Amino acid sequence: MNIVFMGTPDFSVPTLEMLVNEGHTVQAVLTQPDRPRGRGKQLRPTPIRAKAEEFGIPVYTPQSLRKGEDAVEMQTLLESLHPELIVVIAYGQILPKAILDLPKYGCINLHASLLPRWRGAAPIQRAILAGDYETGVTAMQMAEGLDTGDMLHILKTQIACDETAETLHDRLSLLSAETLRETILLLEQGLLRRTPQGESGVCYAEKITKEMSRLDFSASAVEIDRTIRAVTGYAMLNGKRIKLLRSCCDGQYQSDAPAGTLLREGKHGLYLVCGDGAAVRLCAVQPEGSKPMQISDFLNGAAVQEGVCLTAAE
């Protein structure tokens, strides 16, 4: 099948790889323009651009598909390619109706949630923050609204009790490729069916902000654990900033110590007391000026006294 692919971050890479490996003709790749990255703020290509160039696929980086010279040029290009399908996954731009209507089979978007739950920008983090037990990938026929198109195919996966946004991101990235593979197979067999989303269960995954990582120790252990796993948690320890990267909450550890207190368990265990008296087991942290480390390595190198308290990040 002749396909134009639109994507930007590493989340999109397995899906592009799948299309190439399955023998589809990827006529062109559209991705976001190169951005300054890293400490040196040097221009670097997006992960999708790097992968497309590795495959020898023409790459285009329009500033906009809706207005200006870039939009006109891309419209002309896409019309000349006559793609049968446009695939969109984490591209970062809104497609105009003229492009949505261009391919024979329209435009299919891969969205990392079980639509209509968690439409919008941050479905992975929001699912963890809400305590969802499952999520998945929805292949959707794109419409002009925000993630409102008809559903075509869905693959589901469980969210583990210690799942982080990072681990779930990586699993859903691979699941997106499989979802599209199965969707195209159904399409080619004439078995693909469109299911309107409806309005029951609609909720929106608003963008994640840095402030959300600032821990409030008066919150429950469940809430703090979800925050750490979804967006990481920031706090101060002995006057220095520390990032809490991974945690686990089984509800079994209780303490009368003040919220924010760190309690050691043997040589390799560290718990954070929360506002409801329950404690969260810390699994990985990143002290200021250091690399991420497992909690056992952190305790081996840090003088963490029993009963010391974390305080809110400055």
Image (tube, rainbow, N blue to C red):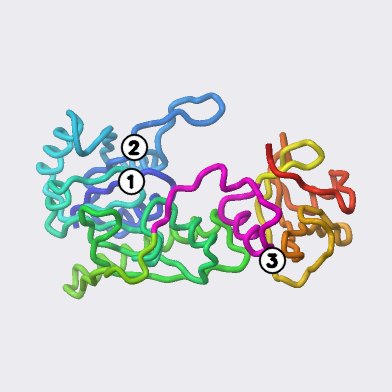
Q: Amino acid at mark 2?
A: Gln
Mark 1 vs mark 3: give the one in front.
3
Q: Which kind of residue does numbered mark 3 sit on?
A: Cys
291 left or right of 101 in image: right
Nearest to N terminus: mark 1 or mark 2: 2
Quadrant of the rendering where the N terminus is positioned: bottom left
Give x and y (percent) for residue 245. 65, 51
Q: Residue at the spot x=61%, y=68% of the render?
A: 161
Q: How far apart, in angstroms, are the residues tagged by discs 1 and 3?
A: 35 Å
Query: Label 3, on which residue?
Result: 249
Task: Please state the extent of the stretch shown in magenta in the rendering.
Answer: 204-233
Question: Which is nearer the eye, 309 or 304?
Answer: 309
Magenta-drawn stretch contains 273 = no
Distance between the Cα atoms at labels 2 and 3?
A: 39 Å
Tag 2 residue: 32
Q: Could you tell me residue 217's position as x and y percent? A: 71, 53
What residue is rendered at 20% in x and 31% in y? 70
Q: Earlier in the sequence, mark 2 or mark 3?
A: 2
The count of marks equals: 3
* Disc 1 from disc 2: Cα separation: 7 Å
Residue position for label 1: 91
